[in-house]
């Protein structure tokens, strides 16, 4: 959540940022409510500090009076101390209640967009930030979309997925399963080469973890929930991997942490329907490698650029045409300050498919998670957190099948052959 000091000292930037997000006026009004409550909190804290000071002063006087043998006057002052203690308890309770109100309002507000985030309401308003030089492939007239290629070469089975589980769940088989495994290993190896520590996290998380990274309360309807155990299936490895640092105080030289994690991801995608969700375009379970960074605020945007270059290198090695979008305020995630989406061209469908989001959350997640570091002055500061998909497999598989299809089969990108141990699907 947004830090109180940002609301106090950068209110104009906050309001301009929320206008980019197209928030309703009642949401924007929460900023003034927070600031009003914070003013009341300061008054209460000042009154409490004064009473505690008076109580401490009287306690010392009482001690001196007893030492001098003036017990009567000492006992009289003890009554005053008791009254002050009772009043301090009331003020502490009021302070606790006010802080809870502030916290509840903060949780309802999204992150403040970075100044470079464009205005806009929908995905159509996103900016094309970068386009690869690789030309879009020209396919033969009889080229097939990936779901037809899957049937032809027996790569995955949507009908069996429906039978075993339900709509949106895929059963991979034969070379389709081997391609899936090859991509996972390729992406993990590339991340490790780039200096990321590999993590295998739990696939379920508790409410504190989901709240810490901003999935709750914003994405509650999209997450699968195990009610009996009060646990959530993860929508991305970002959640468990970033929460490694929840309630942690780091030393400044521990910043710059780079972690990667492979997990299946589970998303309900409620209300999704139509041709754009056919095949692997949108599924409820998919594999993904996530990269996570914990950075000093002064270095986080340089780290974001590094992450973009890493994802670019993966797509270059897979020989896929792609572009990078800078998301507008209306299309950005709840917790993000700046997000770049990578899209790969789907040759048979003649449309762009999102395969990665790379984001800087600044202090939004670290504030929620109570993640801090001590600087040289001993000050407690929230670091910036970042993450990105490197990469999400379902649509990458779809893009490889469609873009690399030939008259006599599907060509495997050169960089992937050591992992698949075959050069062609036929």
Image: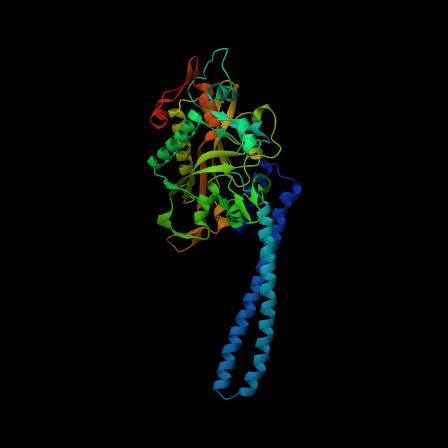
* Among the 4 quarters of the image, the one containing residue 284: top right
The image shows residue 142 at horizontal and vertical percentages of: 50, 12
> Residue at position x 66%, y 43% from top?
26
Q: Is 381 displayed left or right of 87 in the figure?
A: left
The image shows residue 307 at horizontal and vertical percentages of: 41, 35
The image shows residue 283 at horizontal and vertical percentages of: 54, 31
Q: Is 180 displayed left or right of 25 in the figure?
A: left
* Among the 4 quarters of the image, the one containing residue 332: top right
Q: Is 257 displayed left or right of 146 in the figure?
A: left
* Res. 69 visible in picture: yes
Q: Residue furthest bottom?
A: 69
Above or below, comparing residue 307 to residue 67 in the picture: above
Q: Residue furthest top?
A: 141
Above or below, comparing residue 31 to residue 172 in the picture: below
What's the image's color scheme? rainbow
> Residue at position x 48%, y 87% from top?
68
Above or below, comparing residue 199 to residue 184 in the picture: below
Q: Residue furthest right?
A: 26
- 85 and 178: which is toward the camera: 178
* Res. 328 visible in picture: no
Q: The C terminus is located in which quarter?
A: top left
The image shows residue 53 at horizontal and vertical percentages of: 52, 70
How many badges with numbers are in the image? 0
- 330 and 266: which is toward the camera: 266
> Residue at position x 56%, y 83% from top?
75
> Residue at position x 44%, y 23% from top?
400
- 305 and 258: which is toward the camera: 258
């Amino acid at each position: 959540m947004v830090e109180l000091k940002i609301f106090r000292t950068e209110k104009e930037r906050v309001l301009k940022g929320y206008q980019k997000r197209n928030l309703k006026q009642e949401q924007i009004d929460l900023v003034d409510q927070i600031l009003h409550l914070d003013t009341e909190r300061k008054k209460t804290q000042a009154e409490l500090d004064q009473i505690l000071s008076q109580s401490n002063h009287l306690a010392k006087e009482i001690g001196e009076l007893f030492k001098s043998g003036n017990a009567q006057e000492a006992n009289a002052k003890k009554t005053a101390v008791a009254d002050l203690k009772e009043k301090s308890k009331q003020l502490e309770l009021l302070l606790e209640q006010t802080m809870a109100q502030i916290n509840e309002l903060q949780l309802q507000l999204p992150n403040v967009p970075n100044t470079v985030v464009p205005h806009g309401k929908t995905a159509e308003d996103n900016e094309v930030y970068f386009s690869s030089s690789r030309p879009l492939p020209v396919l033969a007239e009889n080229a097939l979309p990936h779901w037809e290629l899957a049937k032809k070469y027996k790569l995955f089975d949507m009908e069996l997925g429906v039978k075993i589980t339900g709509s949106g769940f895929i059963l991979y088989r034969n070379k389709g399963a081997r391609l899936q495994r090859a991509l996972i290993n390729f992406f993990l190896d590339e991340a490790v080469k780039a200096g990321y520590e590999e993590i295998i996290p739990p696939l379920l998380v508790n409410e504190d973890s989901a709240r810490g990274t901003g999935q709750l309360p914003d994405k509650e309807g999209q997450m699968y929930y195990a009610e009996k155990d009060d646990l959530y299936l993860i929508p991305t490895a970002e959640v468990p991997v970033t929460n490694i640092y929840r309630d942690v105080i780091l030393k400044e030289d521990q910043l710059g942490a780079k972690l990667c994690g492979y997990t299946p991801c589970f998303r309900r995608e409620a209300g999704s329907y139509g041709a754009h969700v056919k095949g692997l375009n949108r599924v409820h379970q998919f594999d993904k490698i996530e990269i996570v960074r914990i950075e000093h605020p002064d270095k986080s945007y340089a780290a974001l650029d590094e992450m973009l270059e890493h994802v670019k290198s993966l797509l270059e090695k897979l020989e896929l045409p792609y572009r990078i979008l800078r998301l507008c305020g209306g299309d950005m995630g709840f917790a993000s300050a700046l997000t770049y989406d990578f899209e790969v061209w789907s040759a048979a469908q003649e449309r762009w498919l999102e395969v990665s989001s790379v984001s800087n959350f600044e202090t939004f997640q670290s504030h929620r998670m109570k993640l801090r570091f001590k600087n040289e002055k001993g000050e407690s500061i929230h670091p910036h957190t970042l993450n990105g998909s490197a990469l999400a497999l379902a649509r990458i598989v779809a893009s490889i099948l469609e873009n690399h299809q030939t008259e006599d089969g599907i060509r495997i990108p050169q960089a992937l052959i050591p992992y698949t141990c075959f050069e062609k699907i036929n």
